[in-house]
Image: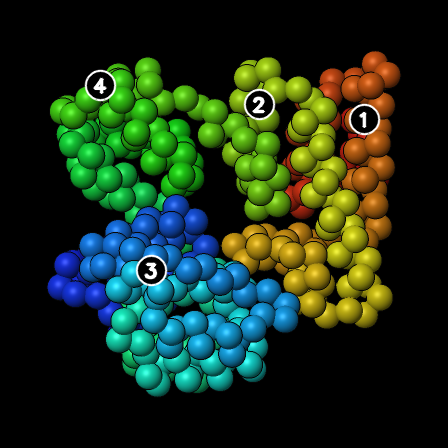
Amino acid sequence: MQIKPEQLNAQLKRGLASIYFVSGDEALLVQEACDAIRAAARQAGCSEREVHHVEGGFDWQGFVQSGDAMSLFAERKLIELRLPTGKPGDAGSKALQAYAARPSEDNILLIISGKLEANARKSKWYKALDQAGALVTIWPMDLKQLPGWAMRRMQDKGLQPSQEAVALLVERVEGNLLACAQEIEKLLLLHGPGPIDIDQVAAGVTDSSRFDIYKLVDAALQGDPVRTTRIINGLRGEGVEPVLVLWALSREIRAMAGMAFEISRGERGEQVLAKHRVWEKRKPLVRAGLKRHSLAQWQDMLERCAEIDAMIKRGRAGNVWDEFLALSVCLGGAELFRRVGHAV
């Protein structure tokens, strides 16, 4: 049974399913969905919680036996199965199918997974869980959906924001749900329940989430020079140490150069991404970057990082923030210049 995240609370009030499977890579929403299930399980008498982490060599048979076993200390127990990759393997697939075929009447199973690949939703174990339990899939939130989400969240907290206040809040957090939730809590703490206008948001919500060094890397890889420039100017205005900005850029470029080298040696792109543990949400960015630049170009950018490092540490002539901008725009596909008028 598929349940939309916004339908979960209503479903929990109607009665608990034997199995819940929550998947997605929007960490805040996954956490809150799981918290709601945990709270409902406690109210239903699950006073004991048992957590299993699926790693290499995981004892799937022991997991199935645990699900069948009665708790020694409570009438019912909540069993959590952490499946970060969303890939249980052959043994796990059989174990999940076996559990779904005869779920425990005494216990509740909560499976928590990262984002599932399309083929996982066609697997036998996934279909078995779908038939036996409740599946909550949490998709990444589009920026267009964020104002509505922020408005509902503020109203749930007792705040009554104006449309302009919500718009400014969304602009400040730039799609970061966790930052948005934290800023809403701050507004509630500062002003208490009641109306919230744009001036209160402007005074209470900082720009710090906007000017994040990691967002600079992603904006650069996206080939968005306007946003890249805005973030760099923000980092500079906030007094962020140049060495931290260089660390973030050089770390990304070094990783991309390593992946480009492995692909040049004949390794498959998806295997390389998996080996380097690229998050599912960032894979499109990384794939685009690897297609955009050759191995030689990545090596050129690493050399530029070394030059910027010398500027920072040894006071070599040049404006380090201009260099950051040139390097970041190059990540997005522009030509890299060592000096004005001299292309690499």
Q: Pick the residue in front: 114 or 95.
A: 95
Which marked residue is nearer to the observer: mark 4 or mark 1?
Answer: 4
What is the count of numbered marks?
Answer: 4
Which marked residue is nearer to the observer: mark 3 or mark 1?
Answer: 3
Question: Where does label 4 land, which residue?
Answer: 191
Query: At x 41% / y 84%, what residue is drawn?
Result: 98
Question: Where does label 1 land, which residue?
Answer: 309
Disc 2 + disc 1, Cβ < 8 Å = no
- Residue 231 placement (x, y as % from top left): 54, 28
Q: Amino acid at mark 1?
A: Asp
User: Element under label 4?
Assistant: helix
Query: At x 30% / y 30%, what residue is drawn?
Result: 184
Question: Mark 3 and mark 4: span between their CA atoms?
Answer: 44 Å
Left or right, residue 12 beside residue 233: left
Quadrant of the image containing the C terminus: top right
Question: Where does label 2 land, which residue?
Answer: 235
- Residue 126 placement (x, y as % from top left): 41, 77
User: Element under label 1?
Assistant: helix
